[in-house]
Amino acid sequence: MDRTSMEVVEFAGWPRCVRLSNGQVELVVTTDVGPRILRFGFVGGQNFFHVFHDTEGLTGGDTWHSFGGHRLWHAPEAFPRTYEPDNVPAEYSWDGSTLTLRSVEHGNHLEKEISVTLSPSAPQVSLTHRITNRGQWPLELAVWALSVMAQRGEAIYPQEPYVPHPDCLTPARPLVLWHFTDMSDPRWTWGRKYIRLRQDPTASTKAKAGLLNTAGWAAYVLGGEVFVKRCGFEAAGTYADMGCNNETYTDPDFLELETLSPLTKLEPGASVEHDEQWLLARRDCGPTDEDVDQAILPLLDLLTGA
């Protein structure tokens, strides 16, 4: 229909949600808590995001809840700073093309904002994540955008191009493992061109890894469809968690695709932004590197300049 429509709907127990659609894909964003994007998928199709049923419709209280969906955090992760609850309503505005959601972490004096622009004619979304320091002292942080993905899919991250020894003697990039990550876990596939992590509801353990992803994209394959997430890489930037601009986490309930901006010393009143572009496509992807090359790499050209 070559335009983006907006309406207020009930979703997952929250009465004041905003639905954006261009006739091909749709997003649902709650304003009762957050900011959170609770749904992204083809119209009438599967939701690529996991939403926790036991917290549907929940508001208020002093306990942090994941809720699911796509959220905005700040890195590096630390307790209790990172886990300040976002259980109160988020302000929102709509200018006819962009939906902007805003809330304040009063304990950290940080204002969080997500601006969402759905293409009027393609299954693509552009997002700007913005954090503003409303406190009286400078803070060092990275903008951290986390998408909580639905069960039974598989995440795909690109490796640096393979170069044989001794043609190149310098390291390619950091690969960072958390203490609870077992590299022999069968959910991982450590390929020559790609790293893959499968979400398995029958698993009993958790896993997390981070990497410096200069290619700037990641994908999630689910039920014959592909979600592609693209973000920038700044060669001069210093990244959190031993140098990660991408991280991924999984447990029996969900899998996260995470992107991070470089660390920034944020002075009082200053803001820092981090952009992502999303794309959906109806196609499957087999288990080999060649399958990824054929199914996903052509989609990256569609996001160039999105």
Image (tube, grey):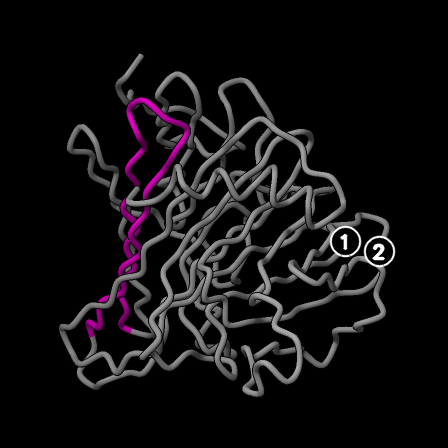
Q: Which residue is mark 2?
A: 203
Name the residue at 49% across, 69% down: 83
Disc 1, SS:
loop
Name the residue at 16% across, 78% down: 268
Name the residue at 75% across, 65% down: 206
Q: Which residues are magenta?
A: 109-134
Q: Is residue 80 above or below residue 41?
A: below
Magenta run includes residue 229: no
Q: Residues within 10 Å of mark 2 (few under 14, many from 20)?
A: some
Q: Is residue 181 left or right of residue 248?
A: right
Amino acid type for the residue under numbered disc 1 = Pro
Image spot of residue 61 (x, y percent): 48, 57
Q: Which residue is mark 1?
A: 252
C-beta proximity under 8 Å, tags 2 and 1: yes
Q: Is the N terminus in the top left, top right, bottom left or bottom right quadrant?
A: top left
Image spot of residue 250 (x, y percent): 69, 59
Image spot of residue 69 (x, y percent): 51, 45
Image spot of residue 16 (x, y percent): 37, 32
Disc 2, SS:
loop
